[in-house]
Image (tube, helix red, strand yellow):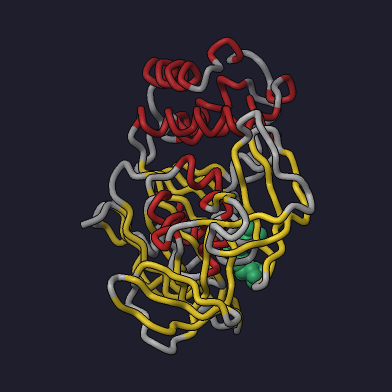
Amino acid sequence: MSFLRLEGLVKRFDDFVAVEGMNLNVEKGEFVSLLGPSGCGKTTTLQMIAGFVTPTQGRILINNQDVTHLKPSKRNLGIVFQSYALFHHMTIFDNVAFGLKMRKIDKVESDERVREILSLVHLKDFAHRYPRELSGGQQQRVALARAMVIRPEVLLLDEPLSALDAKIREDMQTELRSIQRTLGTTTILVTHDQSEAMALSDRVAVMNKARLAQIDKPFALYEHPRDSFVTEFLGKSNVFEGSIKDANDGLSSIDVSGLNLLANNTDHTIGQAVDFSIRPEKIRFVAQGKGVIDGTISSRIFLGNQWVFQVETSIGEFSVVSLNTSHIDIDQGSVVGLDWTPSEVRLLTREVA
Ligand SMILES: Nc1ncnc2c1ncn2[C@@H]1O[C@H](COP(=O)(O)OP(=O)(O)OP(=O)(O)O)[C@@H](O)[C@H]1O
Ligand SMILES: [Mg+2]
């Protein structure tokens, strides 16, 4: 039995359904992200686990115990919310010690645990300072230390890094992951940043419109998304509407605007409407006439480590991403062939609007 289980969790606010039929199993020590667009129900789900929002329906189990109607303080959770309010009149040391004091842990042990966790978040020399004397990233680490010091069974994080700039954020991601690994704390992270979710998580749960759309390991999710919503939420893709024309010898042919394109066989049936999807980094430039389709470069953008090209073709515009190999001979206006193999194509169930 999984360590944390959400069983058919539903939350309605009057007529409005914020979370619908959420089922999730998280193993002990696992790091799972809830990823999805604004308003899809991530925070509401986390708040139900935390006990601050009462589910309309369904159950929450932690370590085989039904905690659905338990008070937040009885659930042994560590929580870091987006606005990680520290106590401004208390030193960093006292901020972190607060939860232990509440739990009446004796002073010697408490001091020891606070020193240990401050060292883990690289703040042991800051113990005597006040929150206003720390940078945003440092304050964020205090919030994390404060949640971790009580040795929670489950750590709940709601966009804890969203206030930080890109560089500090990356450093904090690395640190968060390494602390979580060291302590083996079962962790649920809410984020709408796909690269953060993929970088940190054992598994990513993508949510869309109050529902769980798909859950899997980051690589599997990126390579085998179920529908165009998951595909496009995890990165860019070239998606074209088509229909299955034929299927044999392990290959399907798909009619996309009159063009016959190939993909590895799937369980789709002939005549079925599908979305044909190929990611920009899977497409290679070849000589005109030598690839799957020809096109004209309509723009190219340099991003340092990579180039992003827009290519006009008879079935629509493609995005193509190429690594910067210190050599570039593809100019705007040139006519090129675009090539890929059928195994790099994904056929997606068309999302019903
Ligand atoms: N107390 C409430 N009363 C009524 N509606 C609410 C309440 N709390 C949340 N909602 C609605 O439920 C939906 C889901 O909200 P939630 O905060 O879970 O979204 P989210 O996925 O965390 O979004 P974001 O990425 O913007 O934080 C939203 O449409 C929101 O307006
Ligand atoms: Mg939220």
Whether residue 311 is situated above or below residue 158 in the rendered picture: below
* Left or right of 297, for residue 7: left
List the single residue furthest toward the top: 125
Kindly indicate the quadrant of the structure image that contains residue 259.
Answer: bottom right
- Residue at point 50% right, 44% down? 79
* Left or right of 327, for residue 228: left
- Residue 85 position in % (x across, y down): 66, 38
- Residue 346 position in % (x across, y down): 45, 65
Query: In front here: 238 or 196?
Result: 238
Query: In front here: 307 or 35?
Result: 307
- Residue at point 47% right, 47% down? 156
Whether residue 7 is situated above or below residue 108 in the rendered picture: below
Query: In front here: 341 or 130?
Result: 341
Whether residue 212 is situated above or below residue 337 in the rendered picture: below
* Ligand 1 positioned in quadrant: bottom right
- Residue at point 44% right, 70% down? 262
Whether residue 271 is situated above or below residue 153 in the rendered picture: below
Query: In front here: 259 or 153?
Result: 259
Kindly indicate the quadrant of the structure image that contains residue 69.
Answer: bottom left
Quadrant, the C terminus: bottom right
